[in-house]
Image (cartoon, rainbow, N blue to C red):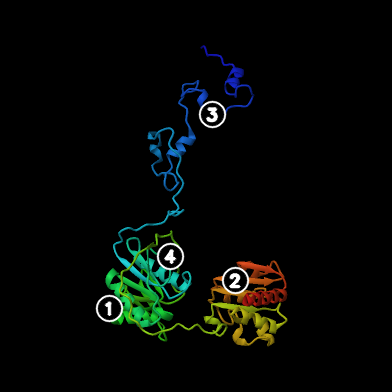
Amino acid sequence: MSRQRRDPRSDRLAHSVPGTARPRFDMARQVAATGPGGRARRDPRAERAGQTVSIDPRLRLDRAASHLLPAAAPAAPALPSGLPTRDVLILDAPAFTILALAEPGQDRLSPTDRQILGAARLLAGAQGGVILVVDRPVEDAGAAGADRVIVLPQAPHPAARLALVEALYRQVGPRHVVASEAADGADLARRLAARLDCGFFPAVEQIGPRGIVRTLRGRGLDQVARQPAAIMTILPDMVQPYAGKGREARAVDAELAPPPSLDAELIRPQAGSLPLAEADFVVSAGNGIRDFDLFRRVAAALGGTPGASRMLCDAGHMPRAAQVGASGTVLAAQCYLALGIAGAPQHLQGIAGCEHVIAVNTDLHAAMVERAELAIVADAHPVMEALLRLLAEEAQA
């Protein structure tokens, strides 16, 4: 058996930049398409590019057909600025639609709105589409489970809002309407059911194989509807928010007549006057607070409702109505500022429903510091004095 001899020095010289000992980076140009053994050479970079979808860079599902692609496939272009950076579920032609009526607000979706969307997604399944109806633009509707978003004009008067939703209902023709059993949603759902003279099922607690379930208060019985009603209200904190893959949340314009002109005005309560259970912003004191006059001035300046830990209420420094925790008041605030609170388990249970938590404590390893999104490891009194100075400077400016 005879085999052609190879000179390694000549090979290295052929693969080097002329006049230097540095090897070339384009070594593929120095050899033929087949190697010395007659085996076809592969370019893994070209194969990878050929297996990639060009618009949204990801591997194709039909990677087995990559050998049919050209060897030097063009590189994937950059994403256009208007396209999402992650995959979302797009439902172009839903079999039916569900209207999810969000509560009036000023910012992003509230936890109650997310629960309404979670209930609507359970009713829609894989074939139905969920239309979120809001009175302000929101950015997180797709993650919350909305396929379409319709922004209606703000209507402070209940009758004006009813006229808008009724006109939208007649235009869209949804299979079901879902609203909250709390605040404005309960009133709007009842008005809409009476105006349309259709089925109504309030205070829903479960949506599952059994059907639509609610509890008959005071009787210890469950009422089960095998078929969902046309209009339903969801009891807060009973249905889980949607946690699946993001939806499209395509904005849709509804051509509706302007609502009737009715005199109404939204008057916000005085800062700090709301009870703990209804407050959106709570400023709470713990065992690390010694100057309670300073604490009350800070809470009033920030516009928060004062709260306290159980130790302060037991000691008489704060009223019992201000106690936060499992044995006091369970909060559902958007923001909770904990000053000098270590974070007992009962206290953490009371703030489990708070969206944002800010902690000021000298102990870096305190449970409240671990729970907080923003933590200031310092004595609370200098922090409160600094807050008062900054608020005074902002008021003067």
Residue ID for mark 3? 26
Q: Is residue 328 left or right of residue 164?
A: right
Q: Position of residue 181 (x, y in %)?
A: 41, 79
Q: Nearer the viewer, residue 156 or 13?
A: 156
Amino acid at the residue labelled 4: Ala
Q: Nearer the viewer, mark 1 or mark 3?
A: 3
Residue behind mark 2: 357
Say which amino acid is labelled 1: Cys
Labels 1, 2: front one? 2
Q: Amino acid at mark 2?
A: Val
Which residue bears the numbered disc 4? Answer: 141
Q: Residue at x 67, y 83 (%)?
A: 312
Badge 3 crowding class, 10 Å Cα cut-off, few under 14, some 14 to 19, many 20 or more, is: few
Where residue 285 sits: x, y (%)? 66, 79
Q: Secondary structure at mark 1?
A: loop
State the CA–CA distance, disc 4 to disc 1: 28 Å
Query: In the figure, 261 relative to 239: above or below?
Result: below
Q: Nearer the viewer, mark 2 or mark 3?
A: 3
Residue at the (48%, 84%) spot, across then down: 267
Q: Position of residue 124 (x, y in %)?
A: 34, 65
Q: Using the numbered discs, state the Cα–Cα distance from disc 2 to disc 3 in whole angstroms.
A: 56 Å
Query: Of helix, strand and loop, which one carries label 2?
Result: strand
Do the CB atoms of the residues marked 1 and 2 lie less than 8 Å apart?
Answer: no
Q: CA distance from mark 2 to mark 4?
A: 23 Å
The answer to whether 165 appears left or right of 237 in the picture is left
Q: Residues within 10 Å of mark 1 (few under 14, many from 20)?
A: few
First reached walking from the N terminus: tag 1 or tag 2: 1
